[in-house]
Image (cartoon, rainbow, N blue to C red):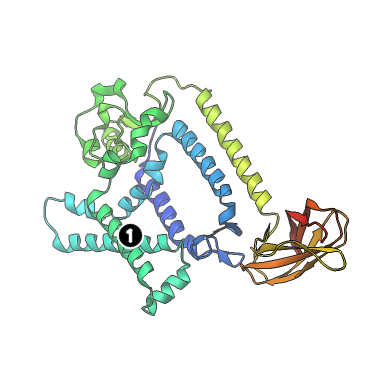
Amino acid sequence: MTTTRRIGPWRRWVGAAQAVAFAALPFVRVRGESALRFDVPTLRLHFFGATLWMGEFFVLLLGTLALVFAFLLVTLVWGRVWCGWSCPQTLLSDLTQPLASERARRKGRPLRLAGAWALVAAVSALFAAATLWYFVTPGEFLSRLAAGRLGPVLSWSWAVLGAVLFLDLGFVRASFCASACPYAKLQGVLFDASTLVVAYDQRRDDECIDCGACVRVCPTGIDIRDGLQAACIHCAACVDACLPIMAKRKRPTLVDYFFGEPGAPRRRFRPAVAGLAAATAVAMAGTVAAAVQTGRSSLDLSVALSSQYRPRRTEDGRVVNAYAAALENRGRERVTVHLTLDAGGREAHLRPDEVALAPGEHRAFTVVATVSGGKPGIGSAEVTAEAAGHAPVRARVPFVVPEAP
């Protein structure tokens, strides 16, 4: 690749857009709910109009697996593009860059330094709050904050998270990437000979004037001329530093993005890339299929034979079984659920046979099944729950016919 323009401005624009999206997304509502929020009291995940309940979180696990494969694929092809362009550590460090700049100045400027620290505090407080908005709606958070009723849980969560971000952005910054980030330690395993990297062109080493500009601007303090290093986050600050210096000599930059070592041939087909692409596609297809399967009905039904009431026969020969049932309305509207029992063709009645549920309501109750006749023993029956606008849900249950008295 041949870079002719500074990369830093593009990175800052992309980073600012991602920061705005992170802070603004909780305000977006889809079908009356937050576009993306995990509601702790009800253990529900709202995801762009869909709602996942705790019993359906296996869909989220499949989605996470798909993201892991996709992340590995991106790393294998484009290297640490995540670190340099999308990692929150990098983005927030860029937003608070004035602090690093003021520290680097030789002459002290107390007012500017104080302003830089104030910026770090503001960014920490804002993004700590924005993180909580993915668990509590921004409207509720801000209204409770304005009324002074934020509560101990939200108050402490905001304070602790804000303090962690403040200490991180004030004192740790990019040194985390160079010393503690586990992803940095894995890059040697994930990269191959054709992965995109930021590298120094050793073939043109005689053109380097040893100005040290690439070293001075590096946020992790490495010398890119020493070759590929785990601490390099591919932010391309060294590219921007070398570009104008070499331009004065009418030569291209010595540091640039390369697919593999500068001058080495790039392999078009790589088995690892094909394998990861296939794994990502399969995992994504499985996630979509599971999401469609769980999203067919907004009702959930569970039925089990009650341990509190023994099966019995009535005087007219009918058989009565009692069940512990639970219904959940996962929709956003009130519904009336009709219950029926299929007992293999025999006449059957349920009591109650109709249950009204508010949006999001979970109700446990006892349902009594009465079936005409039958031979003594344990058979099976099927309970069906139906409501207008919802796909029916069914539960298979045992049906016990006791001996005649």
The relative height of residue 261 versus residue 59 in the rendered view (above or below) is above
- Residue 353 is situated, as x and y percent measured from the top left of the image, at 77, 69
Residue shown at 41% from the left, 46% from the top: 86
The residue to which callout 1 is attached is 161
> Which quarter of the image is occupied by the C terminus?
bottom right
Residue at the bottom extreme? 147
Residue nearest the viewer, comparing 321 with 329: 321
Q: How many marks?
A: 1
Callout 1: 10 Å neighbours few (<14), some, many (20+)?
A: some
> Which quarter of the image is occupied by the N terminus?
top left
The relative height of residue 24 versus residue 149 in the rendered view (above or below) is above
Q: Residue 338: which quarter of the image?
A: bottom right
Q: Specify the amino acid type for callout 1.
A: Leu
- Residue 190 is situated, as x and y percent measured from the top left of the image, at 42, 30
In this rendering, position of residue 116 left or right of residue 321: left
Residue shown at 48% from the left, 62% from the top: 40
Residue at the left extreme? 107
Can see residue 252? no
In this rendering, position of residue 256 left or right of residue 33: left
Residue nearest the viewer, comparing 305 with 256: 305
Residue shown at 28% from the left, 60% from the top: 163
Can see residue 193? yes
Q: Judging from the image, what secondary structure is the residue with disc 1 in?
A: helix
The relative height of residue 153 versus residue 79 in the rendered view (above or below) is below
- Residue 42 is situated, as x and y percent measured from the top left of the image, at 53, 64
